[in-house]
Amino acid sequence: MPIGKVQTQILVKLEAMHRLTAEQRESIMVRPEDLTGEALEKILQDEFHVSPFQLLVAKARALGIAPYNVARYRLTSATFERIPQEFCQQHLVLPVGQVGDLLLVAFANPFDVSLPSKIHEMTGMKVIRLLGRDKDIRDRFAKGPADREAAGFGDVVDQIGAEFGSVGEVTEEDLTNEESGPIIELANRIIEEAYFSGTSDIHVEPQEKDVVIRYRVDGLCHEKLRLPSKVGPALVARLKIMCNLDIAERRLPQDGRIIFKQYTRKNLDLDLRVSTAPLNHGEGVVMRILDKQKTTLPLTALGFSEDNLARYRRCITQPYGMILHCGPTGSGKSMTLYSALNEINTPDVVIRTAEDPIEYTLPGLNQMQMHRQIGLTFASALRAFLRQDPDIILVGEIRDKETANIAVEAALTGHLLISTLHTNDAPGTIARLTDMGVEPFMISSSLLCVCAQRLMRRVCKTCRIAYEPQGREKDVLEKAIGWSGQIFKHNAKGCPKCGNSGYKGRIGIHELMVTNEELISAVNREAETAELKKIAQRGGMTTLHQDSLAKVRAGVTTLEEAIATVPPDM
């Protein structure tokens, strides 16, 4: 459409809004060179009292698209997840919202018809065009990165600055009072933002001059917010109140649980496992997010290789014995346990679980929450379960000698017992149980399999870069899995789909040690862990390192991530 015709339509709309008289319209049309950009805005504002937004509305109506007041939009860390910031600055566009598979984008230049199709190819989403002022969009990009980073908390931070600027001590009454809103709002906002950004853990860490809030996403921590040091005690006290801990006890670690739906008006049914600890600059808090709305994944989606999956399924369908999962905190043990139980959970099977905390609620399971303060421990729960005729027992964790011995006895008396243990690899579990005081012949008689696992980041399929490994990288692949060829590395710049990190999501790697006659004989004679590992490998065990490189060969992750997660085998 010719620019002159569009300008005429704009002026007709403005005249319909009773902002221009016929004479005023005549005077402007005499000067068509002034009918674009800031010159037109200045004439209309100075001579005819037409505001910039009124002009924007008129332009939008003339073009048949919706206007958008970009000046009121606040940038957040999620603004440029779909479209890179450099692209937006170059073409003067700004993503301002998302509804389902529709992406709302404000355009400064509505006449560039190729831009929507470019954005569609980039994001895979249908683009809804909105008209924004050129100046407003430029002003949004003029804001510094710090403004964007804390945008989700800006209003709360401002309120806290006003409230705590001269406040020295915060009492429990201040925090429980609804009128002391900033701290309450801050605590809620931290948890809500963490949930929506896919965070697994929230870290509240007091430093000498400030308090740092960090989120762990896909296994890596990144800083989200910094607050004045005076806010630290008040925020920690508020979190303690939410999980019914003693706010006066600052010298000892405490554990609690937040049922978050009691404190938010949003439809978030999630709990948080809370742990506090006295640090050198104050109390620190770590909160693990337990999303009760999540469902368990099928075993096929957890990263098991075909061979490991077939062997693991044979183990979990046995009528009795002990299955152990080992690995550090956050390695996906709980998800694997729940997925296994979900697969074997049928109406003719009685399943009892003892957990601390209950992370997922599954139909058909009889789940028990531990309370150490009143003496309800894993050991006491196990004793109670053995009197209730269960078929399968899940124990959240084997932490001490008493629990270990009762677990072994349960596995020897006709129950399938599944539990977790903190060891580095599968063969090391035998030494760990022996250290706890379990007799080797009891271990060999009860143990079905041990599954060690870790979580690795998936490389982004959209922006990953293919290459042929050379030198040391090639040697590592050939030594571990006897293969070398094209693999992928992550793109340091990333793309909108992976949040410019090069990685998106995580996948499990597994080391499954299934008992056999040779392994049982070695356990009974108290063989060293290194010998047990060699025997297990002869029996078909794939080590964590080998499984991680198999994922590299399949293009699921990168060699860099595999080596960083699990060191090469000796």
Image (spheres, rainbow, N blue to C red):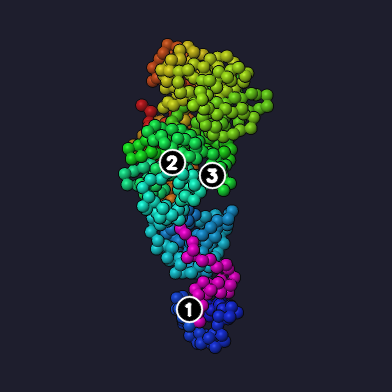
**C-alpha separation, residue under disc 1 versus residue under disc 2:** 53 Å
Q: Tell me if residue 249 is in the magenta stretch.
A: no
Element under disc 1? helix
Please tell me the numbered disc located at residue 263: 3
- In this figure, which residue is indicated by the disc labeled 2? 237
Mark 3 vs mark 1: give the one in front.
3
- In this figure, which residue is indicated by the disc labeled 1? 45
**Residue bounds of the magenta highlight:** 48-75
Quarter of the figure with the C terminus: top left
**C-alpha separation, residue under disc 2 versus residue under disc 3:** 15 Å
Residue 367 rendering spot, x and y as whole percentages = 59, 28
Residue positioned 51% across, 20% down in the render: 379
Mark 1 vs mark 2: give the one in front.
2
Q: Amino acid at mark 3?
A: Tyr
First in sequence, mark 1 or 2: give its number. Answer: 1
First in sequence, mark 2 or 3: give its number. Answer: 2
Q: Amino acid at mark 1?
A: Gln
First in sequence, mark 3 or 1: give its number. Answer: 1
